[in-house]
Amino acid sequence: MGSAYPLALSENYKQAQRAFAALLESNTGFDLHADMQQLAAERSLYRLSRSELGTLARWLGWQMVVRTRAAQRIGMNVLSTVNARLENAVERELTRLPVAQTTRNSAPMRLSA
């Protein structure tokens, strides 16, 4: 059963997404492996179109939403070391996401009984 509107993502976008996912999921310590992941994420940006950069910023915004506040701060710091413009774009996307209005001034939602 396929979707009526399949999502067509370029290979460059998929590589950027994987690079940023690996960077955000890795330890935040500064070691050679982290530096290599940061370089891979940074390089992946140069192959993206303007619209793909916007899509990546929105995807990264969703990645930040599902993190704890502390992990979100760390993630945004990591993004700022890779590319300040991307960090700013993610911050803008965070204000536009539908959960931004409901979670900003309310208590955390209870997920289990």
Image (tube, rainbow, N blue to C red):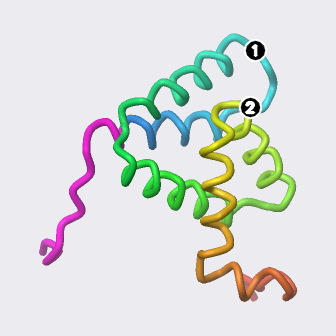
Q: Residue at left 49%, top 33%?
A: 19
Residue 101's quadrant in the figure?
Answer: bottom right
Residues rendered magenta in the picture: 1-14
* The C terminus - image quarter: bottom right
In the picture, the disc for residue 95 is none
Direction top: furthest residue: 32
* The N terminus - image quarter: bottom left
Q: How far across and down, in percent of the image, does residue 90 sit?
A: 63, 56
Identify the secondary structure beneath mark 2. loop
Q: What residue type is labelled 1?
A: Asp
Crowdedness of circle 2 by 10 Å Cα count: few (<14), some, many (20+)? few
Q: How far across and down, in percent of the image, does residue 85 sit?
A: 63, 43
Q: How far apart are marks 2 and 1 (CA)?
A: 9 Å
Identify the secondary structure beneath mark 1. loop
Q: In this view, does 62 lie above or below 45?
A: below
Residue 2 is inside the magenta segment: yes
| Between 95 and 29, the one nearer to me in the picture | 95
Q: In this view, does 104 lie above or below 50?
A: below
Majority secondary structure of magenta residues = loop
Asked if disc 2 and disc 1 are in contact, CB closer than 8 Å, the reply is yes
* Number of numbered discs: 2
Q: How far across and down, in percent of the image, does residue 77 sit?
A: 79, 41
Q: In this view, does 7 lie to the left or right of 56?
A: left
Q: Mark 1 points at which residue?
A: 31
In the picture, the disc for residue 27 is 2
Crowdedness of circle 1 by 10 Å Cα count: few (<14), some, many (20+)? few
